[in-house]
Image (cartoon, helix red, strand yellow):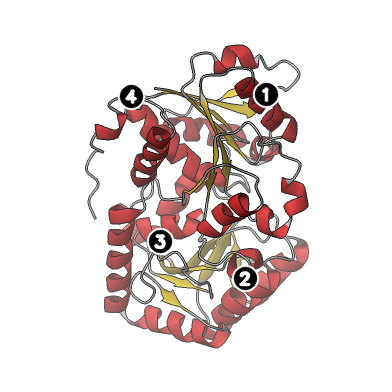
Amino acid sequence: MRVVLFCHSLLSDWNHGHAHFLRGVVTELSKRGADIQVYEPENAWSMENLLAERGGEETLEALRLVYRRVRPHRYTLETLDLGAVLDGADLVIVHEWNEPELVYRVGQARARGGRFKLLFHDTHHRSVTAPGEMARYDLSHYDGVLAVGDVIRRVYLERGWARHAWTWHEAADVRVFRPEFAYEYERDQDLVWVGNWGDEEHGAELHEFLLGPVKRLGLKARVHGVRYPQAARTALAEAGISYGGWLPNHEVPRTFARALMTVHVPRRPYASALPGLPTPRTFEALACGIPLVCAPWEDAEHLFTPGLDFLVARDGEQMERHLAALREDADLRRALAEHGRRTILARHTCAHRVEELLGFCRELGVETGSLGSVVQERVTA
């Protein structure tokens, strides 16, 4: 089975969380024997920002070692030979972080007799919060949409943007995201949070559910991420939180292993307009076996068991109580970590999502061969 994937960037996860999941899917498909080719723009801003970081080139080399099966081709729209790229493809996936022109051109190639099945992959909230932006994409010749949540799937069908749509949640690449027990003795933080400050979608929530509770409890805490303006860095310092800058995502398991707990603070659109859609970091934290406390979000699609996989804080005061309890209660930390990891291994790995993808392909008449029958290498709790 030959698969072609167009994405923004696969090796770079600088402010680009969609790379986390896609790298795991590409790795899983490759290990099962698929011929998968990945294409990303030569001037991808995520990659440019990664290379601008101190030690960026060394980080890129390390990423290539971690993701040995991820070898994207870089292109420009002006020189891209779509005929050659799509020749012999059985399945083509175009991620929504691509230029509308590319989305259109691939669709036209399908309309002109391309024998491949063509899917659009949407992992963002714009279909609900900025429908005008999504209207720029011409999906008239696409066979369907892979939507990161059921609410987004329904939007595509109800607005007539797609003939078929499937819910395809993100997941954890458990070959990379697993407990790093070897670093247990180096634990030197009460709490670590990995995430980007971003913009007005996030600031107030981070003050209520992270900075405030940490300051009141006097926790030893560290934050990693990008897009932190000076005012945000000052607020971190005033809360007693150290700022560690950008952290390549493959280094997150070791960082989690050095802390007692972490938190999940969803951006406002995901907590309000798109209930039920956790970020990739939620899956990855649970896969790493670190106790997790979430700011309010409704698990509308029943992915987890709140209270057993993680704790939920309705407000800043309850977040403070949960964090205090986790600091003092090793049994509580152990129970949450073990239950959360078991849930990931049972339902939410990239191998599970590849099984789902192959099922969608068969619905469309794609011959998947033996890919669906390959047993994933055993990964234990």
Q: Please report contact status of discs 1 and 2: CB closer than 8 Å, yes or no.
A: no
| Mark closest to the chain's N terminus, 1 or 4 | 4
The picture quadrant where one finds residue 162 is top right
As shown in the figure, which amino acid type bears the numbered disc 1?
Gln
For marks 4 and 2, the one nearer the N-term is 4
Q: Quadrant of residue 309?
A: bottom left
Q: Where is mark 1, residue-wise?
A: 108
Residue 258 badge? 3
Query: Would you name the residue on which mark 4 appears?
Result: 33
Q: Residues within 10 Å of mark 2 (few under 14, many from 20)?
A: few
Label 1 or label 4, whichever lies nearer to me, is 1
> Dot 3 lies on which element?
loop
Alpha carbon of mark 1 to alpha carbon of mark 3: how far?
Answer: 50 Å
Residue at image location 45% in from the left, 79% down from the top: 323
Residue at position x 59%, y 69% in the image? 271
N-term-proximal mark, 3 vs 2: 3
Residue drawn at the location 31% of the way across and 61% of the way down? 343
Q: Which residue is mark 2?
A: 272
Residue type at tag 4: Gly
